Amino acid sequence: MPEPHIESEAFMGGFFGVASQEDCVFDLFFGTDYHSHLGTRRAGMAVCDNGHFDKAIHNIENSPFRTKFDSEFHSLKGNLGIGCISDYEAQPILMRSHHGTFAVTTVGKINNIKEIEEELLEKDVQFSVMSNGEINPTELVAILINQKENMIDGIRYAQEKIDGSMTLMVLTERGIFAARDLLGRTPVVIGRKPGATCACFESFAFSNLGYTEERELGPGEVVILTPDGVKTLVLPGDKMKICTFLWIYYGYPSSSYEGISVERMRYNCGKMLARRDHVKPDVVAGVPDSGTAHAIGYANESGIPFSRPFIKYTPTWPRSFMPTLQSKRNLIAKMKLIPVKDLIEGKSLLLIDDSIVRGTQLRETTQFLYESGAREVHIRPACPPLVYGCKYLNFSRSTSEMELITRRVIREFEGDDVSDEVLKQYTDPDSEKYQKMIDRICELLHFTSLRYHRLDDMIESVGIDPDKLCTYCWDGRE
């Protein structure tokens, strides 16, 4: 059996950068805030005003971005700026070197951080250390950039040195460098309005600020943003492997990647699920929020009514309010869901969630529905079983492979020593081992029935060239 994937330095997040002829802070503030669904712990903004740099970083675990950065909204100024929401480290990093002063923000994953750290320490490079005793990964990227004589070569060197992926923005006096990771696993979209150019992760983030979408960067493309527009410095590569989970779960409904909107893809997922299903529940429901669009697609295709038998309570429960202990996280996830009992009692429910990772929360949700009077609870995840921990991003929701319910069940059947060949059989929806695994998961989580989305149907739901999609966490294909 392959070595279990141990979580490396990883950080989910989103970013927004703007170059404007006027002060950019209004656009920077709200553009960054529109990425709050992508991170829960840290946020930051950095600006450049006629060569003078300023930045602010805050903890947003128990307070939203807008509240924490209200004072900076009024105090920061400049015509160039970058902002980020991060799940891991404090950023943007402000750096001074032979490139001059610059700020860096990143989204990606560094699997070989220890090796790079040791190599740089041999060159007498000095690092700051975060409160947990680890090196800040974004600082590491900035130091890699500094190893080359110019900014473009430095960015490319950092990306090529990193095992994993790295999308980044660099704020300088001349403008903002934006670089999509080499295989385009995460998006970078360019927006334009008179006198300003912006770049961001989520395409909807600039629409209410008066920008129109100009284009998405290609894999490995490097550009520089100025108030006058965008200029390509490194041409995009031919190969793309964008993360399919962006459509399934992490992407905001109003976003689009490679021309395919998140909401439309989720409708397609639900439609394809319905076409292969044979159960006849009374109602179809989605686990809020990401399961809702999938459920609408299922209901529209099947003709079975869509219903909301429970509501997610959000006024005082922001996504970022999540204790680090897994037991408490599960409790709070359950506490957010409020039942509508007259839509549950005596009903056969078909419930669609974006995925099943450990299974704990969905088991508790199912139990919660039974306790509220449900007669049956059929579960339909909107993606295939997660069998492999993501090596490229922290967007697949899977951390250590050993935490995945699929791996626990496979270990129960096969023991600890499982060959790659046998493991592949558990990803084949037409194999006996796959069906045995699904039946056991259904039994463990107390569902009435369980049917996962097939990989081929999910890929068809996206509607772009399958070779451009990363599906590693489902099929193990590099």
Image (spheres, rainbow, N blue to C red):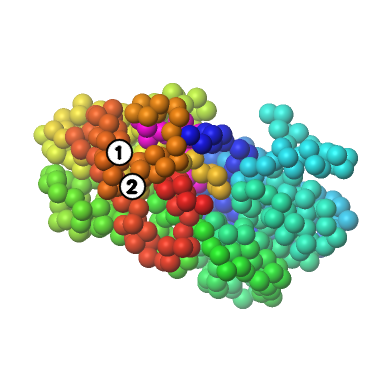
Residue at left offset 63%, top offset 63%: 220
- Residue 471: in sight, yes or no? yes
What is the quadrant of residue 425 in the picture? top left
Which residue position is annotated with label 2? 428
Q: Which residues are magenta?
A: 395-410
Residue 255 drawn at (x, y percent): 45, 60
Residue at left offset 46%, top offset 59%: 469
Residue 340 drawn at (x, y percent): 22, 37
Q: Image height check: is 129 above or below 328? A: below
Q: Image height check: is 200 above or below 443? A: below
Mark 2 neighbour density, 10 Å: few (under 14) some (14–19) many (20 or more): some
SS at mark 2 in the image = loop
Residue at left offset 70%, top offset 46%: 138
Q: Image height check: is 2 above or below 224? A: above
Foreground residue, 5 or 92?
Answer: 5
Residue 410 drawn at (x, y percent): 37, 32
- Type of amino acid at the residue the image marks with label 1: Lys
Mark 1 neighbour density, 10 Å: few (under 14) some (14–19) many (20 or more): some
Which residue position is annotated with label 1? 433
